[in-house]
Amino acid sequence: MAKIRPFKAVRPTRDKVSLVASRSYQTYTQAEREARLDYNPFSFLHIVNPGYKYAREITGTERYQLVRNRYQEFKEDHVFVHDDAESYYIYKIVDRDGQVFNGIVAAASAEDYEANVIRRHEDTIEYRERIFKDYLKTVGFNAEPVLLTYPDNQVISTIIKDLQQTRAEFEFTTTYRDTHYLWKLDQPERIEIIQKEFENMPTIYIADGHHRSASSYLLYKDEKALNTNHTGKESYNQFMTFLIPESELRINEFNRLVKDLNGLTKEEFLIQLDTIFRIENRGIMPYKPSKKHHFSMYLDGEFYSLYLRKSLYDFKTSLDALDAQILYKTILQPLLGIEDLRNDVRIDYINGKKDIINVKDKIDHGEFAVGFGMVPVDIHEMKQIADDGLKMPPKSTFIEPKLRSGVTIYEF
């Protein structure tokens, strides 16, 4: 039974939302960040990068306190308003490729995370969980929702579509040419219907934001332990999420690039590959696989197709059948010596939305020796791995939609 609740969001005013909304801090180049900070005083980047005001890098607890200060300044200057009524926020994105995403910004339960009602398919790094938990505790807000997905539901879909016939609270297009819409749903009868529909769902799934959800859960545990009058109704019992139906989730793959062949010659490497893959040289024409357990490889100016010899591979679990895991177990670890997919400096990743030519260019320019591609994970694989309590290798999925920071804010 999933507990998905309305909340009172802090939001930019209608006239400033397009100026406030920003991508995640790490996705900007330094030049892009500086341009926005120099010429847009309302960008949410001013809040998360408070040291820019003093032309210096500020880290740790000092930064967290200044983030809180900048946030309070935005509220004092009426850039943000705080809604009076608990609401769901219907959110729609039409991206530059014409893909449409419809969902609900709402508060999910930390208890559901603990009880595995909210299921996860990726490992998290403990020190990153703690750092972000400390950040949340100091700043007192979260401005970037965790992306959750749920089985398609006709009742919820109808309510969303009906509300979308009215004028949106927000409608703005970014310089990235994505158009964003937000509607406020605060009618008690509709809220009750949506809550009950989610309560009928035994499980929902994290699509993106595993570290954010883990950190929110740690914050909940800390605050609950400190609060002798804990009731379960405090704001720290929830965390902000964006919930979309499974049919609208877009999952892309990550291509892998490796800097060297681990001391092997090209011929030695191909011979070892031949023991577990059927190999076909595709020449200079770009090649992308179209089936599970088929891979592309770019090496020394040529594309290859690699078809797994299934009789030689042991499928014991749902994880064993995942292409990213197969690539790791058959090539990256035993042949190329990549043990730690997250931290080894010899491996890098390019999301599958980018053309395979990006892989070719990096190898042709000598940055890497070999690149691999695969087909994307599908929603059923992702859910099965989560249901089995297993975890995908890092960079197994590049998931859309990607929300902007600062459009809805959840305060603790």
Image: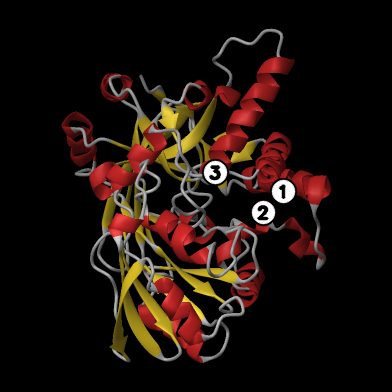
Q: Where in the figure is residue 52, as x and y percent of width and height?
A: 75, 64
Question: Label 3 to label 1, Cα distance in Å?
Answer: 28 Å
Q: Position of residue 25 (x, y in %)?
A: 60, 60
Tell me the amino acid under the disc marked 3. Answer: Asp
**Measured Cα–Cα span from mark 2 to mark 1:** 6 Å
Between discs 2 and 1, the one toward the N terminus: 2
Q: Are marks 2 and 1 in contact (CB under 8 Å)?
A: yes
Residue 123 has which mark? 3
Sequence-earlier tag: 3 or 1 = 1
Q: Which residue is mark 2?
A: 48
Q: Amino acid at mark 1?
A: Val
* Residue at 19% over, 41% down: 161
Whether 377 is drawn above or below 210: the answer is below
Question: SS at mark 2?
Answer: helix
Disc 2 marks a residue whose amino acid type is: Val
Q: Which residue is nearer to you in this view: 82 or 55?
A: 55
Q: Find residue 175 and report its image quarter.
A: bottom left
